Image (cartoon, rainbow, N blue to C red):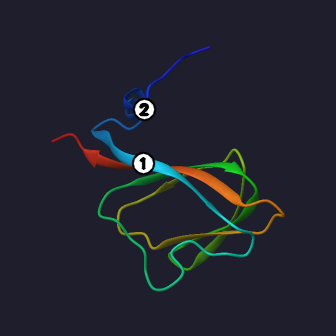
Amino acid sequence: MRKLTITDFSALFPGYRVDRGGVSQYPPGERSHAEGRHVHDVPEVFYLLQGHGEAEVDGVTHQVAAGDVLYIEPGEDHHLTGHSTLPLAYTWIHLHPTE
């Protein structure tokens, strides 16, 4: 086993530090960030905990499921929609440059 803290997690992304994060869930069929574009000026990482569905990134739809890790580049418009009987649950973190 390797025990990590959230700060250690940023070692996977040299030059970045974890700034903030959380856990979110959406009922089946509900889209995150329902209206308009949703972008950040820093990378965002999602780890899907439960369910399956779609990640729409810059208008392209990708199938996603629990266990997947998504790395969203700065400026990419992104939305998640669950399609299972359980809510789509995931953790998310924003990465900021260390300099």
Quadrant placement of the C terminus: top left
- Badge 2 amino acid: Ile
Residue plotted at (65% across, 73% down)? 61
Instruction: Find residue 73 and report its horizontal and vertical position in percent.
Output: 41, 60
User: Do the CB atoms of the residues marked 2 and 1 lie less than 8 Å apart?
Assistant: yes
Q: Residue furthest bottom?
A: 36
Which is nearer the eye, 15 or 17?
A: 17
Q: Quadrant of residue 60?
A: bottom right
Residue lying at 78% horizontally and 69% vertically, measured from the top left: 83
Task: Name the residue at 44% across, 26% down.
Answer: 5
Residue type at mark 1: give it: Gly
Q: Which mark is residue 50?
A: none
Furthest-top residue in this view? 1
Earlier sequence position, callout 2 versus callout 1: 2
Crowdedness of circle 1 by 10 Å Cα count: few (<14), some, many (20+)?
A: some
Question: Circle 1 is placed at which residue position?
Answer: 21
The residue at 21%/40% (across/down) is: 98
The correct choice, above or below, for 2 with respect to 19 in the image is above
Q: Position of residue 66 (x, y in %)?
A: 72, 49
